[in-house]
Image: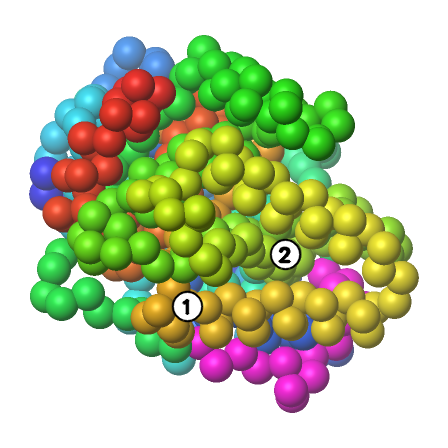
Amino acid sequence: MKVEIQWKKLVKPSVPTPSDQRKWKLTSIDELQMPNYVGVIFYYRDNAGNPGADISQRLHQMEEEIYGGRFIDCNDLGVEFVHAKVDGQIDQLLHRDPDMDLLEYLSQFPNNLVGNPLVVIQVNTFECGGIAIGLRSAHKINDMYTMAIFTNSWATACRGNKDVTVCPSFELSSLFPMKVSAVANWPPPRIIGNKEFEVSRFKFSSDALSKLRALAGDDAKDSTANNFQPSRVEVVSALISKALVKIDQCRHGEERPFAVCMTFNLRDKVNLKMPANSCGNFFSMISGRSDQPMAGKTNPEFNEMVNIIHNMISDAKTKYATIVSKEEFCSTVGNSIAELVKVASSSEVFTISFSSWCRFGLYEIDFGWGRPVLVSNISLNLRSIFLIDDEESKTIDAWITTTGDEMILLKQDPDILAFTS
């Protein structure tokens, strides 16, 4: 498919930002983020049955409802709003493996942040009337939870329900002010020879998730765990991690330590007083490790991997729930990200990184054309795993990016074949 940019424009606030609010203050957590963009793509079929008839009207309405500058950089430069045309049908994209280049073209962005818009929205229209909306924003100013709040409010306004849009809060910087010592020294993305990356979508149905949870629960009956019931995210992460560790060991011909890392949304995990709908970065990174080979086994069993990930999440919940001071909270988050940087920089440890966007309501975002038929992450040229759930169908998609030869082995893994489609 060919994607051609039709036009670009900057959508500016309707009212200039007051001079006393022009200085956007980063929090100590914002300053720890990687200097890149975070993004998502929503895919919609044309449910009106009249291809292309109201594309101009839709674009105008979407542009009009990027309202008030509340999510826009305080220099009032605005959000970059882009329209592109795709020479194909949206179903061609939905019914095949995603293409790294196509994902990038559907949500194009500047190569660096300096002097560029902090938020870029690209609306791609297909010949059939379908639409793919790509959003990117600088990770320094928000996480995916914040982007979900923004997109849902924007979509609600497009449906004409402005009175029920969520009013965001930008008070995190006053609660967790930035400190010079908070800057994280992120390593550059590790280059894996000259091999190109591929991305694939692995679909876990509601039935598959129930079977995995039951399997993990049965395996835990003889353990010391009380009322052990792993979550959907835990069993999906465990199954994928088990397969990837097995592939790593086969490729290297030896066992080596591995670490499972995951984003951890903190908004409902801390007892600190927080304003509702807090926008910005408010998450931590948590990790579970196996520093020694597992009793001479060629690779970990499913239940062992479930236990590692379940304990990782359970320990994090307990740790953050007991924090009573802002200083301790900032220190704990900083230490967790510093540990991730250390692990990511090591070639001695095989690192598996998950970003969980589950329970963010991404499949509920309706601009007036119905729910999206698909939600994906943007193209990233590094190993990554994004988990996105559809709460209506009770399913989870795992968007996995890795090298081509590893992807072949992953798709051939018996457990992956048994539980995904």
Q: Quadrant of the N terminus?
A: top left
Amino acid type assigned to the residue bearing label 2 in the image: Phe
Residue 185 visible here: yes
Q: Which residues are magenta?
A: 170-186
**Would residue 415 be counted in the magenta stretch?**
no
Residue 58 visible here: no
Residue 95 image offset from top left, x and y in percent: 20, 23
Residue 236 image offset from top left, x and y in percent: 45, 32
Residue 117 image offset from top left, x and y in percent: 42, 68
Residue positioned 45% across, 27% down in the render: 396
Residue 128's disc number: none
- Nearest the eye: 73 or 390: 390
Residue 336 image offset from top left, x and y in percent: 61, 66
- Nearest the eye: 6 or 217: 217
Residue positioned 57% across, 38% down in the render: 307
Q: Counting residues from the N terminus, which is met first, the one under dot 1 or under dot 2?
A: 2
Residue 344's disc number: 1
Amino acid type assigned to the residue bearing label 1 in the image: Ala
- Looking at the image, residue 40 sits to the left or right of residue 328; the answer is left
Per the image, label 2 sits on a secondary structure element best described as: strand
